[in-house]
Amino acid sequence: MKKRKTLKSVYSLSDLKSWRDIDPPIRLGVFGDPVEHSLSPQMQNGALEHCKIDMQYARFHILPNGLRKAFDLIRKLEFVGVNLTIPHKIAALELLDATEDNVKRIGASNVIRIENGKLRGFNTDGRGFSRAVREEFSVDLRDLRVMVLGAGGAARAIALQCAKENCERLVIANGTFEKGQQLADSLRNFFEGPKVLGPVPRLQAVPWEERAFQFQIANVDLIVNATPVGLNRGDASPIPSRLLAPHVMVYDTIYSEKRTPLVSAAIEAGARAANGLSMLLHQGALAFEIWFQREAPLEVMRAAIR
Ligand code: NAP
């Protein structure tokens, strides 16, 4: 196979406006602001090359006010699709031509496929999370009592997935309590079934307070961080080690080479913990399958982000 031309690290809206194809052509990408940190290009380009698909995937730094124009341009340039990351996952919704059902429920889309010039939105974060948990801890969501930290885009996708898979219990802890409560209320109909767990409710929003964490940790199996707390250097763990216990599993959706503060706190407490790299991998593999309607080369993609 011919050698692939090296991509620029980041493309801009101006690049899209005066687009010059390279060989193999760029027909996929990730839109974000910031976007420099994204690992998706190495993962998706590994998959494209392995599957001998003659196209490339690039990073695009797109500001919020440039998203509409960028969508118009990739339609004309016959892109296959794009991933969306911060801050476009929610804002994109009003610019899409069609969305799958769970995008409407979650209120955020991380994958777009372009079909005959129309933009169709998908969300693979929830299913990616579910696969990641199975892989990391050899357990299914349906057998778990889960506490999700956060009520933003990632938390909503994860909470909906837990609900759809009929998890034993779901607790939402969010800084802005009302947002957590709203999320719990939106999932109420999934939790009317017969699973009975004694005195604690199956579905509950709780305040972002130490006392609430302490009580809930005794009544959950899996804690998921779906906030950006831990992303910035100097951030403390969203839950201190002294509140964690060896029986819990901890999944931090933040991914980094080093241990995140929450993962460190969990290990210190004797708990099992994983960071968001596996979720990144599985949401990306699901995106590849949406774009190409074929199985993604998971191990190639895994090796590419390692
Ligand atoms: P988002 O929509 O902006 O939501 C952020 C959430 O975090 C909100 O619920 C917010 O609470 C809460 N929050 C923010 N700062 C906080 C603080 N200092 N203390 C407590 N809570 C705080 O963001 P998102 O798109 O959901 O992303 C959240 C995280 O998920 C990011 O770190 C991202 O890296 C990760 N993620 C990972 C993957 C993966 O594949 N591994 C995929 C998607 C997302 P309020 O409601 O009170 O503001």
Image (spheres, rainbow, N blue to C red):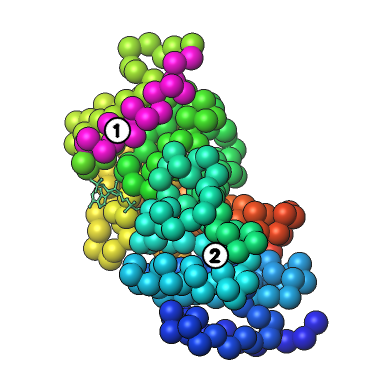
Q: Please provide percent x and percent y for residue 196.
A: 44, 12
Residue in the foreground of this view, choosing between 167 and 143: 167
Q: Is residue 9 visible to the viewer in this orientation of the structure? A: no
Residue under numbered circle 2: 82
Mark 2, secondary structure of its residue: strand
Residue farthest right in this picture: 1
Q: Is residue 86 visible to the viewer in this orientation of the structure? A: yes
The correct choice, above or below, for 2 with respect to 214 in the image is below
Residue at the location (47% across, 61% down)?
84
- Neighbours of disc 1 within 10 Å: few (<14), some (14-19), many (20+): some
Quarter containing the N terminus: bottom right
Residue in the foreground of this view, choosing between 14 and 195: 14
Residue at the location (22% across, 42% down)?
175
The correct choice, above or below, for 105 with respect to 303 in the image is above
Q: State the extent of the magenta-drawn residues as a range.
A: 177-193
The residue carrying mark 1 has its beta carbon less than 8 Å from ligand 1: no
Spatial distance from mark 2 to mark 1, Cα to Cα? 30 Å
What kind of secondary structure does the magenta stretch mostly adopt?
A: helix
Q: Please provide percent x and percent y for residue 273.
A: 45, 46
Judge from the rendering whether residue 122 lies leftward or rightward of residue 90; answer left or right: right
Residue under numbered circle 1: 182
Residue in the foreground of this view, choosing between 19 and 37: 19
Q: Per the image, is 106 magenta?
A: no
Q: Per the image, is 184 magenta?
A: yes
Q: Which is nearer the N-term, disc 2 or disc 1?
A: 2
Q: Please provide percent x and percent y for residue 122.
A: 54, 50
Q: Amino acid at mark 2?
A: Val
